[in-house]
Image (cartoon, grey):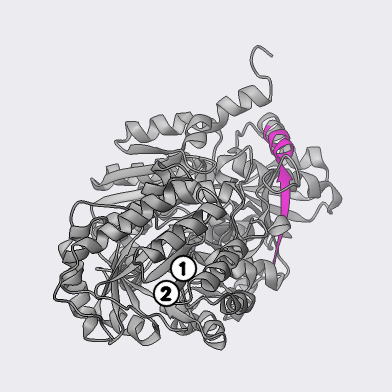
């Protein structure tokens, strides 16, 4: 079988610049090349060490991985399908487009993978109070869901601007028993919600686990959250080999903090012929404050515990950002993406608000699939490049979430009222 | 220059530079020194002050909005050094503005300005090699924080890399005034003494003469931050220097009389 050959031919180890394997972490914990690390108030160091130790211990414990695997299968609905988008492929007339259907997971996005993992860890650590930040509300909903499942207290910090534009998810979180605390500082979006969650954690660190929702923050979060999402790429790589007998030309995913993207990319990193394409939010313009394209307009810096690309001004103040999608509307990006960017292993491009809205409309009407506005950015890039590619090229797009939450914005932006 | 506490307890006053404006901060700083502050922490306003409570958040936001930068803070330090040669000057910042300026460029201009020490809230010893090397090259003292959650290994580690003084956080939490000094504080300072002979300054939640007197029983200095920043917020720009001066003089009022000038 060709697929077997491909399995065997995979390199044994990843490049030093893009791995955080045991040796790398022993030397400098949580570094991805120059990026990552731990830039936090001293008060949090005890909790980070505790989390680090609990996670290391859990990884050695077969009962942990078994319980997580059971929950991912029976509760969350893994494995998710890899779906060949035949009509979209035909319409674009180029590369064959496959969609990894993370939108079909319980709670409607990939976020549940990480929430189940961290929920189990919190239980191991004996922490019964969970806090989390959320942008689009998908991580908040997944956290609230896991807290309901495990009987834990749940507090979600969410920017007031995001509460307005993702109102349905606010109601879902409350229905699930979570307390949603609005944050009005700054631009009242994801970054401000993380600041407030960090302040809560600094204050209640002895009883509370911070269930961070992306590959951001201080070590061990970027590594741990990536590990919980690796299942996306592990499944997708196997599925595409089953379907096509070969690897894709490129894997595409949207990048806010970058959790769904790193989950989709990671298994493919050793497959040098597979392009990895991260799609950032191009927003509505190229000026600082009009987008969230960290790799276009940002520079290395520290935001919220980690060293990575950051949108900032000349004095080091963090810029405001804009995106039609709340989940991509963030001034920094996961440090492992920064390393993948600098090493050239992954490419990062931007799709504008308009591109994402057009992509939503296109895939809804050719495939009957309503993607989250975040995921629509990845689809937009696939729509852009597929026609220029050969018919035997394959694009694997991570459809990270579903778009029901965005109906308010879509109704307004696409003039659906009485159209 | 090295940080020195001339009196016991020493008094450290924190100001968010640029709130409400640079000129007012300068006048307040001079008033604070003249009223008996041994050391000034010159707070660099940052857009995302995640270790700070509402009072300093609001001050930072005002200062960022009116365009205050790290370069402005260093220029202010230079002015203050020229006018008050004896006061200890500490740059108090989040790490990003310093990285943006460049570690060496920052340390060089801080040295030229006559700054004594630097405290970066989100810099832990493990990440600090390059940072400390830059400070050392320019004769600046790195001040690190310890918290009630720090175990003895961490206290040891912080003691090994700190110079000037060590900042002990009185309680688990963010900055801001409180009614009483947490019981955590005394225990933390006692544990820390085993690892260091540096002066220990206790901060977070200290806002009255009674607090300062209580801190004097076991720590070398008290840091007063949010209470001063709140006073500035409530005052007009014209009244702020006198108000802060009187407040700081008042903090000294209950200083135990038997204490002599410390070395």
Question: The C terminus of chain B lies in which quarter of the figure?
Answer: bottom left
Query: Residue A39: which disc?
Result: 1
Q: Does the magenta segment cover residue A44? A: no
Q: Is residue A282 left or right of residue A386?
A: left
Residue B171 in sight here: no
The percent coordinates of residue A41 (x first, y second) are 39, 65
Residue A361, x across and y down, in percent: 69, 31
Report x, y in % for residue A386.
79, 48
Q: Is residue B241 visible?
A: yes
> What residue is shown with label 2?
B124
Numbered label tally:
2
C-beta proximity under 8 Å, tags 2 and 1: yes
> How many C-alpha atoms fall within 10 Å of the one at disc 1: few (<14), some, or many (≥20)?
many
For residue A160, above or below residue B197: above
Task: Tell me the SS state at disc 2.
Answer: loop
Asked if residue B227 lies left or right of residue A114, the reply is left
Query: Marks 2 and 1, Cα distance to the nearest angstrom?
Result: 7 Å
Q: Which residues are magenta?
A: A346-360
Instruction: Determine the residue positioned at 63% across, 23% down.
Output: A412
Looking at the image, which is closer to me, A277 or B254?
B254
Residue under the image location 24 percent in, 60 percent down: A206
In the image, residue B102 above or below residue A380: below
Does A355 sit left or right of A38 as displayed?
A: right
Residue B236: give its label.
Answer: none
Q: Position of residue B235 (x, y in %)?
A: 41, 43
Is residue B224 or residue B151 the one in the foreground?
B224
Task: Say which residue appears at 81% left-offset and 41% top-offset.
Answer: A92
Which chain is indicated by disc 2? B
Query: In the depicted view, which residue is nearer to us: B46 or A180?
Result: B46
Q: Secondary structure at mark 1?
A: loop
């Amino acid at each position: 079988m060709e697929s077997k050959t491909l399995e065997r031919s995979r390199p044994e180890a990843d490049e030093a610049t893009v791995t955080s394997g045991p040796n790398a972490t022993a030397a400098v914990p949580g570094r991805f090349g120059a990026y990552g690390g731990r830039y936090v108030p001293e008060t949090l160091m005890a909790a980070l060490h505790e989390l680090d130790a609990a996670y290391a211990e859990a990884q050695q414990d077969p009962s942990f991985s078994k319980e997580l695997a059971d929950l991912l299968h029976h509760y969350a609905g893994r494995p998710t399908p890899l779906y060949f988008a035949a009509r979209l492929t035909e319409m674009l007339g180029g590369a064959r487009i496959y969609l990894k259907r993370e939108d079909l997971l319980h709670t409607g996005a990939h976020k549940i993978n990480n929430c189940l993992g961290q929920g189990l860890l919190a239980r191991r650590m004996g922490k019964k109070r969970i806090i989390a930040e959320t942008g689009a509300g998908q991580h908040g909903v997944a956290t609230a869901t896991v807290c309901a499942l495990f009987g834990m207290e749940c507090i979600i910090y969410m920017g007031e601007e995001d509460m307005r534009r993702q109102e349905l998810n606010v109601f879902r979180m409350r229905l699930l028993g979570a307390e949603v605390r609005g944050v009005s500082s700054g631009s009242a979006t994801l970054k401000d919600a993380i600041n407030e969650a960090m302040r809560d954690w600094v204050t209640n660190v002895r009883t509370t686990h911070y269930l961070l929702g992306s590959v951001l923050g201080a070590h061990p979060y970027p590594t741990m959250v990536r590990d919980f999402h690796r299942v996306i790429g592990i499944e997708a790589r196997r599925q595409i080999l089953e379907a096509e007998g070969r690897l894709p030309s490129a894997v595409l995913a949207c990048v806010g903090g970058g959790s769904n993207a790193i989950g989709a990319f990671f298994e493919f990193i050793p497959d040098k012929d597979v392009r990895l394409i991260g799609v950032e939010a191009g927003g509505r313009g190229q000026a600082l404050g009009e987008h969230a394209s960290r790799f276009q307009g940002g520079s290395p810096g520290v935001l919220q515990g980690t060293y990575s690309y950051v949108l900032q001004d000349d004095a080091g103040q963090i810029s405001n950002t804009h995106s039609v999608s709340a989940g991509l509307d963030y001034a920094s990006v996961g440090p492992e993406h920064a390393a993948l960017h600098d090493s050239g292993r992954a490419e990062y491009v931007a799709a504008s608000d308009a591109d994402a809205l057009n992509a939503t409309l296109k895939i809804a009407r050719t495939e009957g699939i309503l993607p989250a506005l975040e995921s629509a950015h990845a689809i937009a890039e696939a729509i852009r490049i597929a026609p220029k590619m050969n018919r035997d090229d394959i694009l694997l797009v991570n459809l990270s979430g579903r778009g029901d939450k965005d109906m308010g914005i879509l109704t307004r932006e696409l003039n659906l009222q009485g159209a | 220059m090295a940080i020195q506490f001339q009196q016991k307890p020493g008094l450290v006053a924190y100001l968010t530079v640029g709130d409400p404006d640079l000129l007012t901060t300068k006048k307040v700083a001079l008033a604070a020194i003249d009223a008996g502050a041994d050391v000034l922490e010159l707070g660099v306003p940052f857009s995302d002050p995640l270790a700070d409570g509402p009072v300093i958040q609001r001050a930072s936001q005002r200062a960022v909005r009116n365009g205050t930068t790290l370069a402005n803070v260093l220029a202010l330090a230079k002015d203050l050094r020229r006018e008050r040669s004896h006061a200890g000057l500490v740059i108090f910042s989040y790490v990003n503005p310093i990285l943006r300026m460049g570690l060496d460029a920052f340390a060089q201009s801080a040295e030229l300005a006559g700054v004594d020490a630097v405290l970066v809230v989100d810099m832990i010893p493990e990440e600090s090699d390059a940072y400390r090397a830059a400070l050392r090259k320019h004769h600046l003292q790195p001040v690190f924080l310890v918290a009630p959650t720090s175990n003895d290994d961490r206290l040891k580690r912080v003691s090994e890399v700190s110079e000037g003084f060590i900042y002990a956080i009185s309680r688990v939490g963010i900055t801001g005034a409180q009614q009483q000094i947490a019981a955590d504080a005394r225990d933390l300072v006692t544990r820390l003494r085993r690892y260091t002979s540096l002066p220990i300054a206790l901060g977070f939640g200290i806002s009255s003469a009674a607090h300062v007197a209580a801190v004097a029983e076991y720590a070398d200095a008290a840091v007063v931050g949010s209470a001063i920043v709140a006073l500035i917020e409530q005052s007009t720009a014209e009244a702020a220097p006198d108000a802060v001066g009187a407040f700081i003089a008042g903090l000294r009022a209950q200083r135990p009389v038997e204490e002599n000038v410390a070395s």
